[in-house]
Image: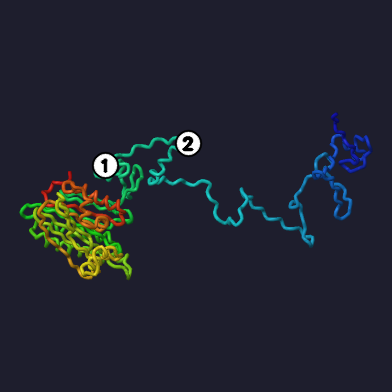
Amino acid sequence: MSQMPQQAAVSKCPSCEEPLESGDRFCGACGYDLSAVPPRPDDHPTVAVGGAVPAPAPAPDGVDWPAARDSDGHGRPVPVHAAAELPGTDSGGSPLPPPPAAPPAPSAPPAPGVRFDRPREPEEYPLQAPDPRLTASAAPHAEQRAEPAAPAAPAAAPAAGDKVCVACRAGRVDDDGYCENCGHAQPRERDHMEQESGPVAAVSDRGLRHHRNEDAFSVGCTALPDGAPASVAIVCDGVSSATRPDDASLAASRAAGELLLTALPRGTHPQQAMHDAILAASHAVNALADEPATAREQGPHQNAPACTLVGAVVTPGLLVVGWVGDSRVYWVPADRTTPPARLTEDDSWAAQMVAAGLMNEAEAYADERAHAITGWLGADAYELEPHTASFKPDRPGVVVVCTDGLWNYAESAEEMADAMPLDAAARPLHGARVLVGHALDGGGHDNVTVALVPFPAVPQGAGSA
C-alpha cells in the first residue's frame, strides 16, 4: 500500500544553528518558526547501475567544516556572489583595480581563425537591377515559383529602321547588342552576312571553330559605257597569323569593289580594272599597318595586317578573274552537260610543289604545309603579283568565288558542282546558302564565304526568285 512520506526531525535551527529537541516547534534561542521551513533533503549521490552507493569522500584537509548558511536569519536565502563581484587584494594587501568592462557578448560564438577587426556587415544588402541578359535563361524556371509573377508589360514595337531581335523577332536591339524584350545577345554583325545585289549574291559565316569571322566580301552591279550589264564579286580571307586580319579583309574587299564599280562604267577594260582593283586593295591593307591601333597591338615579332583576295567580273560575253593567295574561282555550267573547271591557281606551298613536279596534287595537299600561302596582300608581303585571267564561256553557267573555308570541303571542280544546287543561276542567294551549309555540315573548321555570279550578266533588277 502507498504511504505518505514522513518529515524527518530537524536537529538544528535553520536560522541560528542552535541544537533542537524533538517536537520543538520554535527555536528556543531565536524563536524561528520551525514549521515554516521544510526539512533539508538528504543528498542522494548518483548510483551506478547494479553498483553500491559510494561513500562520501572525506574533506581534503580532514576538517569537519560546519554547513554553510542558506538563510540570512529572516527567512530569506543568503545571496550568492560570483568571485568577480567580491573585493580582493593583492599580495601586499592593497585593493585590486576594478576589472575592465567586458565587451558585449557576440550573438554567435566566434569561429576559430576568424578575425573580427573588419567592419560589421549590414544586415540587408541593396538589390541590383535585374540583368536583362538573364531573362531568357530564367524564363523556363518561372513555373517553379510559389506565386505566379505579374504579367510583364508588352514590349514596345521597334520603330522603323531599328534592328529587330533574331530570337523573339519582337524586341528592339539596344546599342550594347541585347534585345530589350527578351535580353537575348545578338550575333555580331560579321558572324553571318548575306547580301544580294541584282543577280549576284554572297554569304559569309564565321564557321563552327573560329571565334570571329575574318572573311569579307563585296558584290555589286554596274553598266559598261555601251549600257551592257556587269556584275562584280570580291571575296577576301584574313590571314589569321597576322594582326587584325578581319580589318584587312574588310578594307581590301571594299577598296577593290569600289574601284571596279567606278572603273568599269568609265570604259576601263575588265581585266585591267581587276588588276587595278587588286593594287587598290593592297594599298588599303598596307595603310592599316600605319594606324595607331595596329601600332599598339603589334609587337616587335608580329607581322602587319594581311589577307588574300579573289574576284570576278562578269559581262554579257566575258568572264575576268583575279586573285592573290589561295582563295578560288570555279566555273560550273548551268546545264551540267560539260565538266566544271577551276579558274585560279593557288599561291601556296602545295601549288608550288605540284608546279615544280616534286609532288602530285594529292600528295601536296595532304601535306601539313599545303595551305601555307606564298602570296598575300599586306605591308610585309615579299612581292605583290596580281594574277588576272579572261575567259569566254560558250554557255550559261555560274561563277563560284570562295575562300578555302568552302573549297576545303569541295576541293575539285566536280565536288563543287555536286554541292551546288541545280537552280543556282536563277536563285544565287539560295545557292550560296546551300554551299555555306555544305561547309558547316562538313565541320566548319574555318570561316566560310562564297559569292555566286551567273554568266552571262543580266540587267540590274534580275535577282533570285
Q: Amino acid at mark 2?
A: Ala
Q: Amino acid at mark 1?
A: Ala
- Secondary structure found at label 2: loop
Q: Position of residue 396 (x, y in %)?
A: 12, 51
Kindly identify the residue that appears in the image at 41 percent across and 45 percent down: 130
Which residue ends up furthest to the right in the rendered image?
21
For this rendering, which residue is in front, 386 or 186?
386
- Secondary structure found at label 1: loop
Q: Position of residue 465 (x, y in %)?
A: 17, 43
The image quarter in which residue 261 lies: bottom left
Which residue ends up furthest to the left in the rendered image?
226
Kindly identify the residue that appears in the image at 6 percent across and 55 percent down: 225
Mark 2 vs 1: CB contact within 8 A: no
Q: Which residue is mark 2?
A: 146
Q: Which mark is residue 159?
A: 1
User: Is residue 7 left or right of 136 when viewed as pictured?
Assistant: right
Mark 2 or mark 1: whose residue is earlier in sequence: 2
User: Is residue 57 left or right of 173 when viewed as pictured?
Assistant: right
Task: Please tell me how crowded label 1 is: few (under 14), some (14-19), or many (20+) other residues with Cα within 10 Å.
Answer: few
Against 263, is 109 above or below? above
